[in-house]
Amino acid sequence: MRHNVIDFKARSSSQKTIETSVSCSGIGTHTGLASSITIHPAPENTGIVFVRKDLDGHPSIPALLKYLVNGHYATKVGLSLEESVGTIEHLMASFSALLIDNAFVEVMGPEIPIMDGSAAPFINLLKSAGLKSQKAPRKFLEILKTVEISENNSFARLSPASGFSIEFEMGFRKGILPKQNFFYTHTSENFCTHIADARTFGFFEDASFMYEKGLALGTSLENSLIFKEGVLLNEDGLRYEDECVRHKILDVIGDFALAGHPIKGHFYGNSSGHALNHKLLTVLLNDPSAWCIREETAKIPSLSKKSYPKTTQIPSFAFGQ
Ligand SMILES: [Zn+2]
């Protein structure tokens, strides 16, 4: 029986991919262009890799911080600005929530479809594909010391913790959106229950500014909560009273998925956005004393020394290679 216990724990912390390929389509919220994705199983230690099937040579783009080409208003990774994929964060958060380590995401278009503005359609899609355990152990990125960053009125901090938890405070737009605060512990069940269906949001007053920048061209009430002078324009109303801060947590999970491994640490953010979250991850990875890579199989209780935690410190420049 002891053997069975060990086997179960080993399986639960081994890498995962999906069982079968699945597809969905829609429009990009920023480009307004039609887009479709097909997600395929991938071998262990592949990570999440985007493949631009609509471009010559089908360039492959690993979903890692080192491939970040733009983090303003959405997360875009690429080999260059042309060979890139935008608005990956909701799909990345979904992979993270279901502990899917390895997948190829073929994309027809420059941007992941926004669907309804939340992660719920991606969660349902990935669940319909089925999850498949692989042999290689999952590796975690463990925070060893606190790192923090602030910019204007925003603040973000990562500190050591046994799992991945997030506290987020939204105090911006005083008088338009009330202050919202949410504490969340990242597990598949918590994500699917409390976070996945929280939609992205924007402000009608920002529309012309965004259009001038070539952004939000596909944004509508079908895929976003839109506030005008503090009043929600969506006739169906909110899914949660604090739907906005829940979505900010969804975005944080997607942003930190670019670490390439699930994180063990606590994140505190006050009005931070994609760009500040990415800067914090950069600060972290550039300080080799602030983190380590650890294999979770180490937690299997055993008298054997082979079961003790195995820690590997790798230099930040080698991260994600
Ligand atoms: Zn978002």
Image: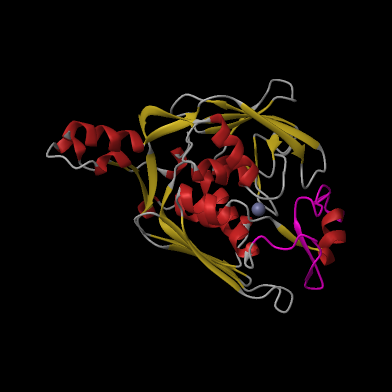
* Viewer can see residue 282: no
Left or right: 33 in relation to 187: right
Q: Residue at x 49, y 31 (%)?
A: 102
What range of the chain is rendered magenta? 212-239
Q: Position of residue 276 (x, y in %)?
A: 59, 59
Between 195 and 275, the one nearer to me in the picture: 195
Task: State whether the magenta stretch is mostly helix, strand or loop.
Answer: loop
Q: Position of residue 142 (x, y in %)?
A: 37, 50
Total marks placed: 0
* Viewer can see residue 293: yes
Vertical side of 18 occupied by 12: above or below: below
Left or right: 249 in relation to 205: left
- Which residue reaches farthest left? 303
Vertical side of 215 occupied by 297: above or below: above
Colouring: secondary structure
- Which residue reaches farthest top? 57
Q: Residue at x 72, y 43 (%)?
A: 115
- Which residue reaches farthest bottom? 175
Q: Is residue 158 magenta?
A: no
Q: Position of residue 123 (x, y in %)?
A: 58, 42
Vertical side of 1 occupied by 208: above or below: below
Between 177 and 52, the one nearer to me in the picture: 177
Between 277 and 103, the one nearer to me in the picture: 103
Q: Position of residue 73 (x, y in %)?
A: 70, 54
Q: Residue at x 87, y 55 (%)?
A: 212
Q: Quadrant of the N terminus?
A: top left
Left or right: 65 in relation to 73: left
Q: Quadrant of residue 67?
A: top right
Q: Is residue 225 magenta?
A: yes
